[in-house]
Amino acid sequence: MDAIVAMLSRNFPNPTTEAGRIEGQRHVRNFVRRYPDLAGLLQFDDRPVLYQGQTAHAVAIPAGGRLPRALVAFGARVGLALYRHHFGRPAPAGASIHSSWHPNAHLDSDESIEELLRSMGQAQTLAQGRWHVSEQFRFWSAAPSDAPDLFCCFAAFRQSFGVLAVVDPNGPRYDDDHLQFSPGFLQGFVV
């Protein structure tokens, strides 16, 4: 899962230094080496689009299958980590996590995502002392006042993609049609 995320997070913006290009190429090679069958599923649109004043290429990932499942599972993992960051404790064992991933084009063009982010306030990043990763990772999070134990977050990785996660400590609320995770799901998770 980490090789997939590392490669996709270098998709945009394009590296501006030789070291950045080498790092991006290393992540692409690692992804292809670990998941040769999944590499053929990625479709880069060869028609560039203007995104935040820069030229970008959209990545299309077909619905269903292992690749989108890995990205949704990554979103659930991020949701659990940010839940712990927000509340200062891990999500209960019986909690359910619902997540989705969004390509870079949605980060600024999906009105429902933009409305959700506005409702959650300013973006945050993780920091240790004076060191922070705001250019690589930012997130929005909130617990609704009418359901304070429910937690919602959206995390953006560089300008490449984002994940939305909702952690419900009271357990599943949906039928099996929705892909749901629970704490501990990473043990034995296979891409």
Image (spheres, helix red, strand yellow):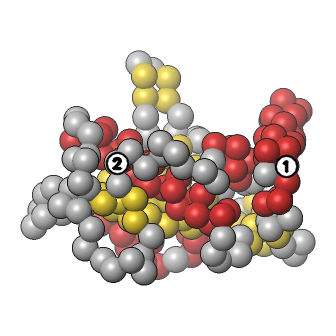
Q: Residue furthest top?
A: 129
Q: Quadrant of residue 34?
A: top right
Query: Residue 115 vs residue 23: left or right?
Result: left
For the residue labelled by badge 1, is the local secondary structure a helix, a strand or a loop?
helix
Name the residue located 23 percent from the left edge and 54 percent from the top edge.
94
Q: Nearer the viewer, residue 63 or 136?
A: 63
Q: Residue furthest front?
A: 188
Residue 104 rendering spot, x and y as whole percentages: 64, 64
> Compared with residue 17, is residue 152 higher up or lower down, i.e. above or below?
below
Badge nearest the viewer, 2 or 1: 2
Q: Quadrant of residue 121?
A: bottom left
Specify the amino acid type for callout 1. Answer: Val
Residue 99 rendering spot, x and y as whole percentages: 44, 64
| Mark 2 surroundings: few (<14), some (14-19) or many (≥20) residues within 10 A | some
Q: Nearer the viewer, residue 57 or 29?
A: 29
Specify the amino acid type for callout 2. Answer: Pro
Q: Nearer the viewer, residue 155 or 96?
A: 96
Quadrant containing the C terminus in the rendered view: bottom right
Query: Residue 73 vs residue 181: left or right?
Result: right
Residue 183 rendering spot, x and y as whole percentages: 34, 48
Query: Residue 173 vs residue 102: left or right?
Result: left
Q: Is residue 159 visible?
A: no
| Mark 1 surroundings: few (<14), some (14-19) or many (≥20) residues within 10 A | some
For label 1, the residue is 32
Query: Residue 142 vs residue 64: left or right?
Result: left
Name the residue located 30 percent from the left edge and 60 percent from the top edge.
96
For label 2, the residue is 183
- Callout 2–callout 1 Cβ contact below 8 Å: no
